[in-house]
Amino acid sequence: MVAKRIIPCLDVHAGQVTRGEQFGRAEQQGLKNVGDPVELALRYDQQGADELVFYDITASAEGRTNMIEVIQRAADQCFMPLTVGGGIRAVEDMRQMLKAGADKVSINTSAITNPELITAGSEIFGAQCIVVSIDCKKVGENRWKVFTHGGRKETEWEVLAWAQKAVSLGAGELVLNSIDGDGMKNGYDLELNRSVSTQVPVPVVASGGAGKIEHFAEVLESGKADAALAAGVFHSGQITVEEVKRDLKARGIPVRWVEVK
């Protein structure tokens, strides 16, 4: 069986990692500064994280320069694969991040507004480098719609339909971000993840809702996700990546194991 992955996520604003709830961003109250991104990256690398996601929530010219520097520093010091997203609107943006040391690039709103970007990135850099991140909000019984612009704008797309379309265009991986669950620590949306994971041929990463160690096993087993992404519970030190992996291993869920120093 393919090992399940545990992936911390760092929202980076003005060179620092921040954290909010339900897609709170830098312009909103309640966003907390939780540390230096490279220091946190090193912590998660030492804990045995399978990958790390950097998300540029500044997404401006200044933010892009800061993010490139962050990726370069992290890639120089960490051994785990790095994914970067936020403000990637063109193939050249992808090229800059991959050249800086990222292994994958994640696109969200730009994938909806310019679907050809998925195909172009996949053809130039390989499907394994192209992650399509999908912001999902429940709108009815077993119905989720895709939102863009940081969860603020509803689209015409149903989540499963967009997931399948993104894969057909060349996406090598999908991330399902639950807007309802983001930062709430009530558990991942199992139905959402299961509804997509069982219908697409690429890995699906669950995001939004981790609050207890058992939530990871739930989404990887019942939710059928290939990986689980989390932020707040890791940044606070409430749970470590190592503890999650020990729990998964004890439950018989395959993980990549490394001895933590």
Image (cartoon, rainbow, N blue to C red):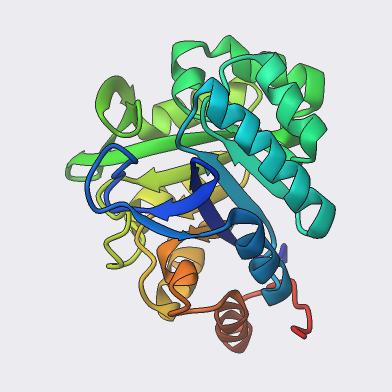
Residue 160 percent across, percent down from the top left: 40, 34
Residue 142 percent across, percent down from the top left: 24, 45
Q: Quadrant of the N terminus?
A: bottom right
Q: Quadrant of residue 61?
A: top right
Work out whether 120 lies above or below 64. Answer: above
Q: Nearer the viewer, residue 237 or 202?
A: 237
Residue 226 percent across, percent down from the top left: 59, 56
Q: Residue at x 26, y 40 (%)?
A: 137
Q: Nearer the viewer, residue 41 or 248?
A: 41
Q: Quadrant of the C terminus?
A: bottom right
The total number of labels drawn is: 0
Q: Quadrant of residue 46?
A: bottom right
Residue 5 is at least partly visible in this image: no
Residue 18 is at least partly visible in this image: yes
Is 230 positioned to the left or the right of 188 in the image?
Answer: right
Is 252 positioned to the left or the right of 219 in the image?
Answer: right
Instruction: Point out the residue furthest to the bottom here.
Output: 250
Q: Nearer the viewer, residue 144 or 141?
A: 144
Is 186 positioned to the left or the right of 99 in the image?
Answer: left
Instruction: Point out the residue furthest to the left here.
Output: 140
Q: Residue at x 59, y 55 (%)?
A: 37
Q: Residue at x 34, y 61 (%)?
A: 209
Work out whether 35 lies above or below 200. Answer: below
Q: Residue at x 67, y 75 (%)?
A: 47
Residue 73 percent across, percent down from the top left: 76, 49
Is 235 positioned to the left or the right of 243 in the image?
Answer: left
